[in-house]
Image: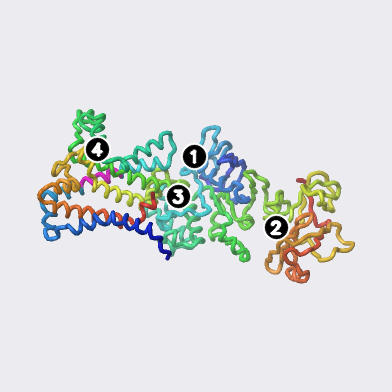
Amino acid sequence: MAEGAVKLHAVVRADVGGFSLDVELTASAGRTVAVLGPNGAGKTTLLRALAGLLPLSAGRVVLGETVLDDPAAGVFVPPEQRPIGVVFQDYLLFPHLSAIENVAFGLRSRGMGRNQAHARAGEWLERVGLSQSASSRPAELSGGQAQRVALARALVSDPALLLLDEAAGGARRRHPGRGPPRPPPPLGLLRRRARVGDPRPLEAAALADGLVVVEDGRVVQTGPLEELTARPRSVYVAGLAGTNLLRGQATGSEIVLAGNPGGRVTTASPATGEVLAVVPPQAVALSRQRHEGSPRNVWAGRVDGIERIGDRARVRVVGPLTLVAEVTVASVHDLGLGEDSEVWMSVKATEISVYPA
Amino acid sequence: MRRPPIVPLVVAGLATALFAVPLLGLVWKAPWSVGWDELTSAPAVDALRLSLLTSLCATALALMLGVPLAWVQARFRYPGRRLVRALTTLPLVLPPVVGGTALLYGLGRRGLVGGPLDRIGIHLPFSTSGAVLAETFVAMPFLVLTAEAAFASANRRLEEAARTLGAGQWTVFRRVTLPLVRPSLLAGAMLCWARALGEFGATITFAGNLRGSTQTLPLFVYVTLEGPHPEAAVILSLVLLVVSLGVLVGMRDRWLRAL
């Protein structure tokens, strides 16, 4: 497979149980595409389909010059013949093999002799900084080490496409303050091949060249990170970007919120019809008394939760509409805010960006 | 710890005694002074040697036939699968003598398949191969059940991972599936071997009781008990008992868990 020319183009339609997936995806050589989505959105199903572990019900997968899947034409390349490396969510290292044997597995099953395969596997273990653990069994490795072994195992056969199934695991979520774990060091080595990953929201997304957001088996939004955060098209995307998303019917500079007849928002940019509006949390001001003669967007609410991030606090307020406000920890103290506190939220019309839904 | 109420306690004690008393009796009656001589007498040695040979052959045969059967049963859904399961489990509950009779009518000289086999020169009944076959018939279900449970519970996703690493189906089986189920296969094979070693009913019905060629240890014990020197029977029974106990201890709770 000629590197540099590899390009993945996939139209994946698959049905598993009652769930149906219908996703189109393109990745060119050296580019990383991150597939994001809430749990059960179909990310893993998509990865399995690309790897050939799940038959397509329709669609077409082309990698470079090779058609891997085309059910209509009866084309199906079995997983063992696809030039695709997969790092599974739970790594799936073989428990009965040592780290080096795990890494050498792909070379051995493609017919390479034991000594040569182990030499190559040893080089890869060195690259991921695990030479010392070559003879360790997976049970003796830490989670991070297992991940690096899994990565080396997927890359040792020089795949044209690397699939990374990385979900936000429970163990990682427990350290929100320290941020998501850094990806393993050899990422720089991967730049020349196409990658499709399903990384922890926004962390690898920041490394990715393009994002595809999948919800309920369908693509809801694609584009670079900046665009997704600036103009989220779903509540999930807005949540990833940490911003507030409102949906409603615009008439001039007023939006009547959908499913919430009492909720009205005034904006500085007149629009008509179905719109989405982003309210940055930093733009939401909180006060104990109603502001006099200030912004027109003022609502009474009740504090539903406070999350501290460093010296900032994210305060969730439920009222005629629900918004997250980001304020300083100091002002939370000054206002004496706690769970269920009564509070006024206000937003300047100019802070709200509006775009067609 | 909570003490159980009196009535179940007494019944449980009785139940345990039912198992323990005969074994104690065996140990008590054992003619320790002449034990070694009886054990090394020519007919006893013949029976021992034959038993080892046939039970090991039966275990090997069960592994060769039973492992693929268990794999197919665990991994594929096909019409008649339950019937096959019932058929291959039947010997567990079938009286062995019925099994032996059935073997005679199936593979005997005038049997359904035995007839044609006989004409091409393969004679199974009343031969050592017949004894092996009878033991396999009775003992293989233990292996198949254990192996099937192991194949069913082995992590299929590891096999998928192997496929993405370029392994074809046979390589996946050899390098991933088999190592994963190896402990269970070993347990099943031991159980199968112990059962084959103790096989009596099917063997005597189908293979007969010919010293040196079909008279296995249990058959020899039975014949000796009727004869003038029952001490030999006792001592050989003890040998079988020790072997069975050894197998059970060796496996601890593994095969029970596998089932």
- Mark 2 nearby-residue class (10 Å; few <14, some 14–19, many ≥20): some
The amino acid at mark 4 is Gly
* Residue at image location 52% in from the left, 42% down from the top: A54
Q: Disc 1 residue type?
A: Val
Q: Same chain for labels 3 and 4? Say yes or no.
A: yes
Viewer-side label of 4, 2:
4
Amino acid at circle 3: Asn
Are the residues flagged by discs 1 and 3 in contact, CB closer than 8 Å? no
Task: Say yes or no: labels 1 and 2 on the same chain.
Answer: yes
Determine the secondary structure under disc 3. loop
Looking at the rendering, the stretch of residues picked out in magenta corresponds to B53-62
Quarter of the figure with residue B203:
top left
In front of the other: B107 or A13: B107
- Badge 3 sits on which subunit? B
Considering every residue shown, the one lying at the far right of the view is A293
Quick check: can you spot residue A355?
Answer: no
Task: Give the chain letter at badge 4.
Answer: B
In this figure, which residue is indicated by the disc labeled 2?
A242
Of callouts 3 and 4, which one flags the residue occurring earlier in the amino acid sequence?
A: 4
Alpha-carbon distance for marks 1 and 2?
41 Å
Q: Of all residues shown, which one is farthest toward the front?
A: B7
Point out the frontmost of discs 1 and 2: 2
Residue linked to disc 1:
A77
**Real-space Cα separation, disc 4 to disc 1, in angstroms:** 50 Å
In what element is the residue under mark 2? loop
- Taking A204 as reference, is B128 left or right? left
Of badges 3 and 4, the one in the foreground is 4
Which residue is depicted at the point 46% across and 62% down?
A: A141
Check residue B155 in the rendering and tell me which mark sits there, or answer none.
3
Q: Which residue is mark 4?
A: B100
